[in-house]
Image: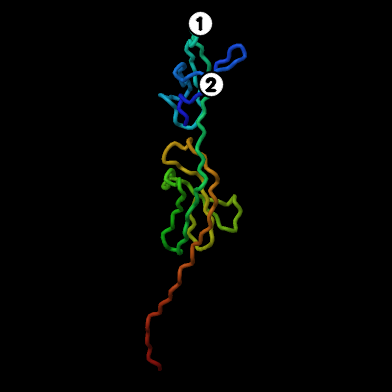
Amino acid sequence: ANPPSSVTVKYTKSGSSITIDPADYSVEFVDSKSVEGTPVEAGAYKAKVTLSDIYGNQSDTTASAVYTITPGEIADLEIEMSGWIYGDTAVAPQITGSDAGLVDQDNTEYEYKKQTDYDYKYSPATPTNAGDYTVRVKEVVWTGSNSNYTINDIAPVDFTISKAQLQITANDKSKVYG
């Protein structure tokens, strides 16, 4: 975020404009959000700029402006998901990528469907039967404030629950003929 000292203030008089030295004005954020000092969270803030009497013949001048901090964009997140064998403990999907540390892995919500089903069939229930499935992110939960970031779509990922091997064991028996 740009600190208020980087705000450019121009004074226009009789058609000519000059850029004012930051030492000659003050910036106060007067927003409905409770902000002490310089805002750091993404969002729009109303700033009140007060220009001191720099020429000695005018009163202080006050103007309002909008100060905006744009959310950072995260574009490289992916779902990592491996399959498992029917009857084993389900594998939890994980978000990976250079900004994955911003994601609360334990509370991010996912949805599942059979690979051949339409998208309206997505469900939060983790599948348990053998088959081919797709997982997608329903909602990313951030470790901090989610208003500071926007994310591009995270592509769904396919995985398989493999069939378990069926083992048949016969007990040895004997019988006398006759």
- State the residue in front, 21 or 44: 21
Q: Which residue is mark 2?
A: 65
Give the CA separation, mark 2 to mark 1: 25 Å
- For badge 2, the amino acid type reads Ala
Q: Exactly how many numbered labels are in the figure?
A: 2
Identify the secondary structure beneath mark 2. strand
- State the residue in front, 37 or 137: 37
Judged by depth in the image, the label closer to the viewer, 2 or 1, is 1
Q: Position of residue 62 (x, y in %)?
A: 51, 14
- For badge 1, the amino acid type reads Asn
- State the residue in front, 50 or 117: 50
- Tell me the quarter of the picture where residue 99 sits: top left
User: In this picture, is 173 found above or below 166?
Assistant: below
- Tell me the quarter of the picture where residue 90 sits: bottom left
Residue 57 numbered mark, or none: 1
Residue plotted at (52% across, 45% down):
75
Q: Position of residue 156 (x, y in %)?
A: 54, 52
Q: Position of residue 96 (x, y in %)?
A: 46, 51
Dot 1 alpha-carbon crowd within 10 angstroms: few under 14, some 14 to 19, many 20 or more: few
For marks 2 and 1, the one nearer the N-term is 1
Residue 32 numbered mark, or none: none
Residue plotted at (45% across, 24% down):
5
Q: Position of residue 89 (x, y in %)?
A: 41, 59
